[in-house]
C-alpha cells in the first residue's frame, strides 16, 4: 500500500479543500478526543488486537485485566496461555487471541528489543507500516490506526464510519469495497490533517451520520454533503 502522497490531480485538489473545511468543522464540534487510543504504540497494538469483533466496554475490561496480571511485555511473552486466556475471556475469542497476543509480545521483543515502543517511533512511515502488518492479528487498518494515534504519522485509516460519511459527502462512489476506499481516500486528505479528520469522521459517523437514519437536519456538514442536501430537498418536496 502506498502511504506517501503525490502531487494531487484537480479532483483531489477540490476534495482536499472540502475535507479541510470538514475537518475544521468537526474539530469545532467535537474537539480533539483520543477515541480511547494510547500514545504508547505497544499498548495501542495490544488494545487494537483485543478490540476486534467486541464491544468497547468488554475489550477495555480485558485490556485492564491483562495489564494487571502482566506488568511488562517480557512477562506477557513468557506467560502461560491459560493465564492470558483467563484475563481476556470476557472479550470473546480467548482461545484464538491468547496465543496471538503472546506471539505478538514475543515477536516485538525478538525484533525490536526490550523497549519496542522507542524503536517503533524511529521508523519511517513505510517501514513502520510494513513491520506492523507483519505482526500477528494486525491488518492494514489496525496498522494505520497505530501509526496515526501513537506514531504521529500523517496517514489516513478508513473504517466503516469514515467510509460512510465520506461516501455521503460525495467523495466516494456508492458500494465501493473497503480496500478501494482505503486506496482512494488518503489522497483527498489535506496534508497534516489525517488524525483530526479520521477522529472527527468516526465520531460524526457514530453520533450524527448514522447508517440507517442520518440526522441531516442540523448536521454541521449539511451544506457540503451531496446525500444530505438531496435528502433534505426530498423531505421538503414530499
Ligand atoms: S448531512 Fe446527513 S448524510 Fe451528510 S454528513 Fe450530515 S448526517 Fe451525514
Image (cartoon, grey):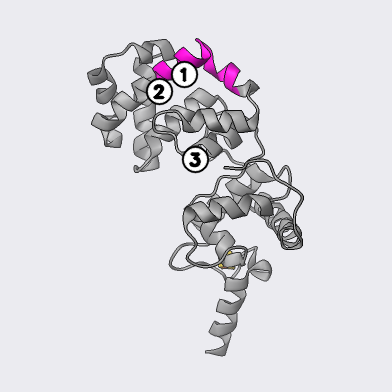
Q: Position of residue 18 (x, y in %)?
A: 72, 60
Q: How many marks?
A: 3
Q: Image point 52% across, 15% down: which residue?
A: 112
Is ligand 1 within 8 Å of the beta carbon of the residue shown at mark 2? Answer: no
Q: Which residue is mark 3?
A: 140
Within the displayed image, which quadrant is ligand 1 positioned in?
bottom right
Q: Which residue sits furthest bottom?
A: 238
Asked if the residue at tag 2 contacts the one at tag 3, i.e. Cβ–Cβ closer than 8 Å, the answer is no
Q: Image point 65% across, 53% down: which residue?
A: 26
Q: Earlier in the sequence, mark 3 or mark 2?
A: 2
Vertical order, 210 against 197 (above or below)? below
Asked if the residue at tag 2 contacts the one at tag 1, i.e. Cβ–Cβ closer than 8 Å, the answer is yes
Between the residue at mark 1 and the residue at mark 3, the CA separation in whole angstroms equals 17 Å
Q: Residues within 10 Å of mark 1 (few under 14, many from 20)?
A: many
Between the residue at mark 3 and the residue at mark 2, the CA separation in whole angstroms equals 16 Å
Q: Which residue is mark 1?
A: 108
Closest to the observer: 81 or 5?
5
- Describe residue 183's horizontal placement relative to residue 77 as left or right: right
- Asked whether 119 falls inside the magenta stretch, the response is yes
Q: Position of residue 154 (x, y in %)?
A: 67, 39
Q: Earlier in the sequence, mark 1 or mark 3?
A: 1
Residue 72 in view of the camera = no
Q: Secondary structure at mark 1?
A: helix
Magenta residues?
105-120
Closest to the observer: 148 or 210?
148
Between the residue at mark 1 and the residue at mark 2, the CA separation in whole angstroms equals 6 Å
Q: Position of residue 201 (x, y in %)?
A: 58, 53
Q: Secondary structure at mark 3?
A: helix
Q: Which residue is mark 2?
A: 104
Q: Image point 55% across, 66% down: which residue?
A: 173
Amino acid at each position: 500500500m502506498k502511504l506517501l502522497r503525490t502531487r494531487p490531480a484537480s479532483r483531489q485538489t477540490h476534495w482536499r479543500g472540502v475535507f479541510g473545511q470538514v475537518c475544521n468543522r468537526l474539530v469545532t464540534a467535537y474537539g480533539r478526543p483520543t477515541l480511547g487510543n494510547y500514545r504508547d504504540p505497544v499498548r495501542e497494538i495490544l488494545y487494537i488486537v483485543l478490540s476486534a469483533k467486541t464491544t468497547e466496554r468488554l475489550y477495555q475490561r480485558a485490556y485492564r485485566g491483562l495489564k494487571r496480571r502482566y506488568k511488562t511485555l517480557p512477562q506477557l511473552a513468557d506467560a502461560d496461555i491459560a493465564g492470558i486466556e483467563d484475563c481476556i475471556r470476557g472479550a470473546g475469542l480467548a482461545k484464538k487471541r491468547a496465543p496471538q497476543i503472546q506471539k505478538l509480545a514475543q515477536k516485538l521483543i525478538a525484533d525490536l528489543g526490550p523497549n519496542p515502543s522507542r524503536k517503533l517511533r524511529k521508523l519511517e512511515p513505510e517501514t513502520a507500516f510494513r513491520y506492523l502488518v507483519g505482526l500477528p492479528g494486525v491488518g492494514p487498518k489496525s496498522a494505520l490506526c497505530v501509526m496515526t494515534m501513537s506514531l504521529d504519522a500523517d496517514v489516513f485509516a478508513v473504517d466503516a464510519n469514515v467510509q460512510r460519511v465520506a461516501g455521503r459527502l460525495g467523495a466516494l462512489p456508492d458500494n465501493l469495497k473497503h480496500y478501494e476506499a482505503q486506496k482512494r481516500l488518503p489522497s483527498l486528505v489535506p496534508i497534516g490533517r489525517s488524525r483530526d479528520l479520521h477522529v472527527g469522521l468516526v465520531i460524526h459517523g457514530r453520533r450524527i451520520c448514522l447508517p440507517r437514519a442520518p440526522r441531516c437536519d442540523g448536521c454541521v456538514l449539511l451544506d457540503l454533503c451531496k446525500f444530505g442536501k438531496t435528502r433534505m430537498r426530498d423531505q421538503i418536496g414530499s
